[in-house]
Structure formats: C-alpha cells, structure tokens
Image (cartoon, coloured by chain):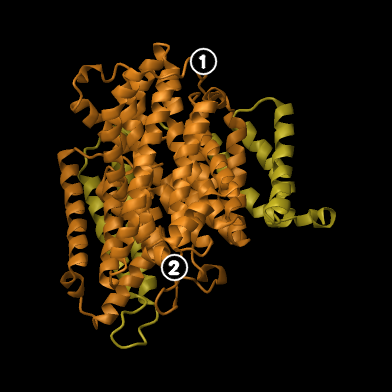
C-alpha cells in the first residue's frame, strides 16, 4: 500500500474528520429532503465555515452533504410525491405508490440501501480509476489540456439546456465574466475600469452563491405566494425492515443503476436526474416483469437511487483528475479546495497524494455514515419535512451575505453576489441554464491559459490542436456533442435537464 | 418564450457589441509570437454575437403563440420587495453593521415568506443574527461588520 493511501485513510478516519462527515451527512439528508432546497444550496450555506477548517475536515463535511443530499432527496419523493432534489424525480414513480399502500418505511429502506450500494460502487470506481486517469493526464500538454477543458464545457452546454444555443450562450457569458481582471498569461488588466476591486476579478464562489441561492429564495417566495410551498408530510413511516425477497429483487436494478450512474457521472453535465431516469428505464427494460414498474415496486426505487448516488463518485473522477467539475456540487468543491490552496487536477495526486486519498476515503465514509444515520434516524429526520420555510429562507438569505463577505472580507463581493442573483433570476426567466455559466467561471481561466500557451509554444500555429491525438480526440468529441445537441433539438428529443444537484 | 428570446438576443447582441468595443481598446501584445491579451476576448465577442444572432433568428422563426407564453405571470410584489430590501440591506450593512441591519431584514423576510405570528418573528429575527455574530466571531474567527455598534461590541 502506498504511503499516500495509508495517510489519506488515516486522515479521513480521524475522529474530527468522521464527525465532520457525519454532520455533513445529517445536513445533506435534511437539505436533500426539503423540497425547494438543493444540495448546492446546502453546501453554499456551510461554505464559509469551511474556510477556517482543516482541508480534510472541510472536504469531509462537504462530501457528507453531497452523499447525504442525494439520499435525502428520496424521502420527500416517497412521502410527499415531491422530489427533494431533482435527482430524486424518478424515485417518485414507484416510491410514492408504495407509501400510499402503507409501505413508506419499506420504500425508504430500499432507497437508503440502494443509495448506499450506488455510492459505494462509485467509491470503488473513484478509488481505482482516478489515480490511473491522473497519471495519464500528467502526460497532457497545453493543447491537450485546452481540448479537455473545451470538451468539458461543450458537453455541459449541450446536456444542460433544452436549447443548445442557450446552453452555449450561458457558457460564453461565463467566459466573458472570467476575462474581467488580470489576464492569466501576461497579467494585463482587462475590463476593470480602473477599479482596484475589479482587478482580482469575480470570485466564482461569490457568483455561485448568487446564481444558485438568490433565484431559489425568490422561487420559494413565489411558490409560497401561490400557496404551493408548504405540504404536510406523511410522517408515519412504518416498518423499515426489508425481507430477503426485497434484497434479492434489488440486486439487478442496483447493479444496473450503479453502473449507469457511475459512468454518466464521469461525463460532465449529465448529472443525477438523467442518470436516475436512464437507470430506471434500463431496469424496467431488462426486468422479467416490467409491468410492475410505476405501481410501487422495489426495483423502481432501487435503480434510480443507486444511479443518482453513483453519479457522485463518478463526478468526482474528472474533478480530481482533470479539474473539470461534473456537476454544480463538484464545481463548488473545486472552489472550496482552491480556497485552501489545493488545485484539483492531475498534479493533486503527485503533489498532495495524501490529501487526494483523504478525499476519496472521506467519500467512502460519507456513504457509510449516510447509511447508518439514515437507517437509525429516518423516523426523526422525516419530521423535519415540516420545517417552516418562513425561518429557513431568511436564514439562507443572511448566510448568503455572510458567506460572500467572509470569502475576502469584502463588501464588493456581496454586491457581486447580489448582481449574480439578478443574473440568475433573469436566466431562469429565459429558460437559460446557469450551470454552463458556473462551469465557465471555474474553467475559463484554464481554457484561456492553455489556449494561449499552446499557441505561443507553436508560434501561433493552430494545427497543434489537431496533431496531438488526445487533443484531436477531445475536439472531435466536442464537435460531436454540439452537433448531436442541435440535431436532437430539431428532432424535439432533448433530454433537457440541467444537472442541478 | 418567443418574445423573451428576441429581447434576450437583442440585449446579448448589445452586450457583445459593447464588449467588442472595450476589447478593441485593450493593450496590444508586447512579446513576439504570443497572442494578445485581447485574443481570447475577441473569440468570446465572436461567439457571443454569433450565438445571439442564432437565438434571434430562432425567436423570430418561432410561432407567435408558444407554449411558454401562455404560462400565468408569477406574483411579482413579494419578490420585488425582497430584492429591493436585499439591496438596501447590503447598502446599509457597512455603515450600520451586521447586527443592526440583519434584525429588521430577517423580520421583513419572515413576514414576506408568510409568517404572521409577531412573537415568532421577533424571537427569530433577534436570535439568528446574534447567534451568527457569535459563531463567526468566536468559532470561525471571522468578525462580521460592527458598524455603529463598534464601540459597544468591542
């Protein structure tokens, strides 16, 4: 065993790290189950707290929220017929009918166990694939790195929006914002209007808080004004016991869902909702009795729950090895790590291998602790479904301000956050996804830097992007994804779902 | 959605034109065989204009009665009050301090989200900001702005 693996395991297993991961799992379960709260918002709320914590403890807390949130989303899907997170949308199909038959406890147990299985499968994928991929990525030159980042960005644009034009426009707006401040190669001030605050550019965590939290606060207000915000929870859960027949019935859908989820998680932009529906669809197709799906069967809960939790580990693979986030949560994780001076990417394994493995093992503990806390506390946790939004939403609003201020002790950042909130509201109104903009904010500087370094090294020869096999492959894949998206739009067959975790 | 797309496209075209104008004013390169600082912004300008024109064409080509246009207008009063109050809160925060501004802001938001029990509003809007100040100051070592209460809070 390499010393990094051992050191990472020990760091992730220290009492402080485990406690933070457990707290994260509880918070994740809570934010995941409350409709109108997303995992991203949950992470945003605790983000300022992580700035002062040790990086391993911080990442344990955040990964706990990530894993817990994915599981928690199914609680309200099963009990209220409302998905707590978009990733739990497919769980409604069979979860709610089971709850209506008085089998809410059994449905919740299936969801919790399948979520754990999916999460652990993706942990093994992360553990075995990430180091090898990082090793491969170390050989990438500037043209390859540009093409990989470009691919990540185009894929998310085409997956995240019903209209690929709007997805691409969202990313271009993000790139435009990234150019504010010093240019990454020469340090020339651009679009700063002589303002010292603008020189350091827009911090993407500030933008992220505004883009995600402010529109959500407004949406919740509109829903409450329409009288649709509060629903009484069916808090009578019943027996949580699963029989041998249930576990046997779960095997195949869990295996299908986990494999699909982990694979789709690796692709930037696909996200939990799509993986859950595809996992559900394939389990139904390959089932001996597909007619039972949709009427409240165990398989119909196991497949999407295994899939959406498997997405989490899958999404961590490109984040850790290439620095490309697979969904909004991994984008936030990149930001949180950058605050600690840790840049996700191939060098992370080489320079801070101990931390890279601590992250991987924290993810494992996040899944284990989510399982334990879910099974032990489900009957208490579901009571929180009745938590009043009248208290929750103002608290989030205040924490948005505190979070954006605490980042650099700057009121300029608070205004930037509010400005991005308005941009987020406008984009939602226009049905334009915010995820490509967010990822462009994360990846934009790298994209420009690799492009300019590659062109400088080749004395301005653009064929350098096609002569390297890696670069050519990713550019071809980028073109294919854009062409496919436009063709699918013309056929009217878009998947059309932003990966909003 | 048709009208929204056309308006959005026109706004984005104007943004692209303005951005292009500012890009034209950026310093030129100082090193041989090295792309200018304006190189990447020019690519963004071109992409922004091209995509905005496609959106405009799609908007103009769409049928007049799109399904998105028929959705009922959301209630606007509370969100507008929320955003105006939020901006006022952020504007006053540096001068009046976190505690003094957050208490009324929290109370207003609770009322906007539909809380009508004044006792609950008073208790929560006093407790939450005070707890936040204490947690950030003593646990996370991040002092929140004290404003005019600086002398009292120390």
**Callout 2: chain:** A
Residue at (35, 44) in percent of width and height: A122
User: Mark 1 = which residue?
Assistant: A236
Question: Looking at this rendering, what residue extends furthest in the top direction?
Answer: A101
Cα distance, mark 1 to mark 2? 51 Å
Note whether residue A222 is visible: no
Left/right placement of residue A402 relative to residue A75 reads right
Residue at (47, 15) in percent of width and height: A239
| Label drawn at residue B149 | none
Chain shown yellow: that is B
Q: Position of residue B86 (x, y in %)?
A: 60, 46
| Between B25 and A138, the one nearer to me in the picture | A138
**Callout 1: chain:** A
Left/right placement of residue A473 relative to residue A121 reads left
Residue at (55, 35) in percent of width and height: B78
Q: Please rate how many residues cluster around mark 2, counting C-alpha atoms within 10 Å: few if below 14, some from 14 to 19, many from 20.
A: few
Mark 1 on the same chain as mark 2: yes
Residue A273: name its quadrant. top left
Note whether residue A274 is visible: yes
Q: Is residue A412 above or below residue A193?
A: above
User: Mark 2 = which residue?
Assistant: A351
Counting residues from the start of the chain, the first of labels 1 and 2 encountered is: 1
Q: Secondary structure at mark 1?
A: loop
| Between A62 and A183, the one nearer to me in the picture | A62
Q: Colour of chain A?
A: orange
Q: Position of residue A13 (x, y in %)?
A: 53, 48
């Amino acid at each position: 065993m390499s010393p990094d693996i051992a050191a990472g395991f020990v760091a992730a297993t220290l009492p402080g790290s485990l406690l933070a991961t457990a707290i994260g799992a509880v918070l994740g379960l809570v934010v995941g189950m409350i409709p109108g709260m997303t995992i991203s918002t949950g992470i945003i709320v605790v983000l300022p707290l992580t700035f002062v914590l040790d990086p391993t403890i911080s990442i344990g807390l955040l990964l706990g929220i990530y894993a817990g949130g994915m599981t928690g989303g199914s609680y309200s899907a099963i009990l209220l017929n409302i998905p707590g997170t978009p990733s739990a949308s497919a769980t409604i199909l069979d979860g709610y009918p089971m709850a209506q038959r008085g089998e809410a406890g059994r449905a919740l147990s299936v969801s919790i166990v399948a979520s754990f299985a999916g999460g652990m499968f993706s942990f093994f994928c992360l553990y075995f694939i990430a180091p090898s991929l990082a090793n491969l990525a170390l050989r990438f030159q500037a043209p390859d790195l540009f093409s990989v980042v470009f691919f990540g960005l185009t894929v998310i644009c085409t997956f995240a929006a019903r209209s690929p034009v709007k997805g691409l426009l969202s990313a271009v707006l993000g790139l435009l914002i990234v150019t504010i401040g010093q240019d990454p190669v020469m340090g020339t001030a651009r679009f700063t209007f002589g303002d010292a605050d603008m020189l350091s550019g827009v911090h993407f965590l500030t933008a992220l808080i505004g883009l995600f939290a402010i529109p959500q606060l407004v949406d919740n207000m509109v829903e409450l004004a329409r009288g649709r915000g509060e629903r009484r929870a069916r808090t009578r859960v019943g027996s949580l016991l699963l029989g041998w027949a249930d576990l046997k019935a779960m095997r195949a859908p869990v295996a299908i869902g986990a494999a699909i989820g982990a694979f789709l998680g690796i692709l930037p932009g696909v996200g939990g909702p799509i993986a859950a529906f595809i996992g559900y669809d394939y389990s139904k197709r390959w089932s001996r009795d597909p007619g039972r799906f949709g009427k409240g069967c165990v398989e119909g809960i196991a497949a999407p729950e295994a899939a959406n939790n498997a997405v989490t580990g899958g999404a961590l693979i490109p984040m850790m090895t290439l620095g490309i986030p697979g969904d909004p949560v991994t984008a936030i994780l990149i930001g949180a790590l950058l605050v600690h001076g840790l840049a996700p990417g191939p060098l992370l394994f080489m320079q801070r291998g101990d931390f890279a493995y601590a992250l991987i093992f924290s993810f494992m503990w996040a899944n284990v602790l989510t399982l334990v806390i879910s099974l032990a506390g489900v009957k208490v946790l579901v009571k929180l479904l009745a938590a009043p939004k009248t208290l929750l939403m103002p608290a989030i609003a205040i924490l948005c301000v505190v979070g954006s201020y605490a980042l650099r002790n700057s009121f300029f950042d608070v205004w930037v956050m509010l400005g991005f909130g308005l941009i987020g509201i406008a984009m939602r109104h226009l049905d334009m996804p915010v995820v490509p903009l967010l990822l462009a904010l994360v990846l934009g500087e790298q994209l420009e830097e690799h492009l300019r370094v590659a062109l400088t090294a080749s004395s301005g020869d653009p064929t350098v992007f096609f002569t390297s096999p890696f670069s050519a492959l990713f550019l071809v894949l980028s073109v294919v994804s854009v062409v496919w998206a436009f063709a699918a739009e013309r056929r009217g067959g878009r998947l059309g779902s932003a990966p909003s975790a | 959605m048709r009208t929204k797309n056309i308006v959005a496209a026109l706004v984005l075209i104007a943004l692209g034109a303005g951005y292009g104008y500012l890009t034209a004013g950026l310093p030129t390169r100082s090193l041989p065989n090295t792309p200018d600082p304006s190189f990447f912004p020019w690519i963004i300008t071109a992409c922004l204009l091209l995509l905005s024109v496609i959106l405009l064409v799609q908007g103009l080509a769409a049928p007049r009665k799109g399904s998105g246009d028929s959705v009922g207008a959301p209630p606007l009063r509370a969100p507008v009050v929320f955003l105006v109050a939020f901006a006022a809160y952020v504007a006053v925060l540096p001068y009046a301090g976190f505690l003094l501004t957050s208490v009324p802001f929290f109370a207003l938001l609770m009322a906007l989200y539909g809380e009508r029990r004044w006792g609950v509003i008073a208790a929560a809007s006093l407790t939450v900001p005070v707890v936040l100040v204490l947690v950030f100051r003593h646990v996370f070592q991040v002092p929140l702005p004290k404003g005019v209460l600086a002398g009292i809070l120390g």
